[in-house]
Amino acid sequence: MARRPLPRVLSSGSASITRSREIARTAADSATDVLHPLITILRGLRLLAVSGRQKWAATPKERRGPKLFLAAACVLAVALVPYGPILALITVMGAAAWKGRERTPVKTGPDEAESTRLRALYEALVPYFSVPDDPDPLFAHGGDWEKAFDGYAFDADGRISRLQISYPAYFTDGEAAARARIEQLLHTKSGRAREYRFSWDEEANRLVMTVPAPLSTSIAAQRFVTAPGETVLGFTDPDAVRLTVPVRDGDTTVDASPVVWRTGHRSTEPHLLAVGQPGSGTTTLIRSIALQALQQGDVLVVDGSGTGEYGALVGCPGVLAVESGLSGALATLEWAAHETERRLIFANRARQGGHPVPEDIKRPLWILLDRPGVLGHLAAADGRPDPLELLQVPLRHGRAAGVTVVLADQFDTLETLTETVRTHTRARVVLGPASREQITAVLGDGPNTTPPPEVPAGRGYARLGTGPVLRLQVPATPDPYDEDASETHRQAVLDALPERPGAAPRQESQPEPVGVPGGPVEDTAEVPVAVEAAPTGQLAKAQAAIAEG
């Protein structure tokens, strides 16, 4: 039997249905666009009605009668006012349109990419936070990461900026090596290009990882508001210290959190040791300390590198000498040792006789040494004593005599430091890129942040005695004769220097003069010239004796 062909209507039905659906969808979209204001108003009226019904249900019964009377009075007043009903209708429609507007949905949880990142981090922590004998493990492969991560936050780039982790009580959080493994893992999985801070709460078994804000590098050298005997080494995080000082940051004045180093006869950290790589900012730190020390004391500078970084200090009031040669450095340090002994003797005599200590004894004396390891190598080759050996008396008795020693050197010469230097320099600073092991070896304790691979000059860590390890950013204090440095920072250093005797009164930095059309521009800026400071008194005699010997 031959098959009959299907009716034409049935064979073309699917195409007609598809076309009809497209027409209906287009018509619905067009109607939605046209009626969108009406839909918004209706949605707002519904929300207003629901809100009104909830407030009416929450109103006590004894207050419903007065509210009805007040509403009726308002309706009557609106009805009697000219154009009142029209204005009331417009007001209600506007309120409904505002109430029914489309709002951006509030994000209540991580998206797919963030969930994937958190799950990967959870799986990476499983080998460290789990044991086979745990009957109900908090960390397990394929487990629920939401139970372990109590809180989290992401930055604009989708990277973790804050993470709170609950870990099992049997984890050995009291061991530094165990904590270091977890911190290294979180640092690796969250991104190596940033710095992370870790806060361990051993009692609650919680670990909080945050990304600290970068420290400001625009604060230049200036006269800081400090008490006598206080020196600002740099600035740290606002939550790390309780003190703030007003500083000039560009054209504005802000409150910054300083790392204050206290010296004097009551200080427990009377001497300081700074260590870093070449170009890390140790010379900048020495120069910043010298500018602050000159406000109330005298300064001796020994530049072992011999690059002339301290030429701006030559001839300034309070600068006793700036030496870069071996003979001058030995003579200067020998005089400093004798001066320390003299101060001790005269102070002891004054106290035994019941007299006040002389003013020249109370005036602080600062001995600043930059790269003394270079001079030690030259002294060993020439058969002379190591300059660090001459620091035994100032280091041991400097606190009682008002003498402060500051040394700055590099990591490769740490082994050449004498035992006296290691023992009495209880204030420590590490600048520049360094590993956690290097930082711990110098400071005696590891930082609570991960050292980033690249840091600006003057960035590092500081620890005063047995205190906590603080992040540090040294104020920008370049050599004012360095043409490659910022003009603003160079001028700030010149403004912080004490005025030389007989020099013209210092003027604040003025804008560049505008030349007259057709005429030359007169340059009235004075170029400072480095002049060798002539040693006086006992210092000159010591230098002459060393030169003759």
Image: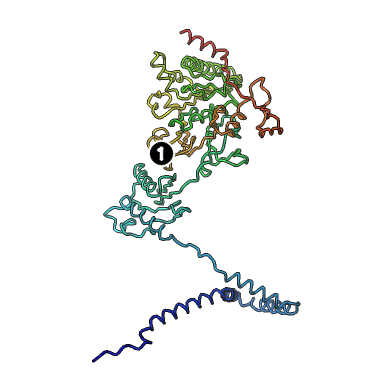
Q: Position of residue 271 (x, y in %)?
A: 49, 27
**Residue at image location 72% in from the left, 77% down from the top:** 84
* Figure quadrant of the N terminus: bottom left
Residue at the spot of label 1: 446
The answer to whether residue 396 is seen in the rendering is: no
Give x and y (percent) for residue 192. 40, 45
Q: Amino acid at mark 1?
A: Gly
Which residue is painted at 52% across and 64% down in the image? 104
Residue closer to the observer: 331 or 356: 331
Residue drawn at (39%, 80%) of the image: 15
Q: Residue furthest top?
A: 548
> Would residue 423 be visible to someone looking at this image?
yes
Q: Is residue 395 above or below residue 470?
A: above
State left or right for residue 26 relative to residue 83: left
Q: Is residue 321 above or below residue 162?
A: above
Occupied quadrant, residue 500: top right
Residue 263 screen position, x and y as percent: 53, 29
Left or right: 410 with respect to 361? left
Mark 1 residue element: loop
Query: Quarter-wise, where is residue 249 in the image?
Result: top right
Hey, which residue is sitting farthest left in the picture? 1
The colour scheme of the drawn protein is rainbow
Q: Is residue 60 above or below residue 413?
A: below
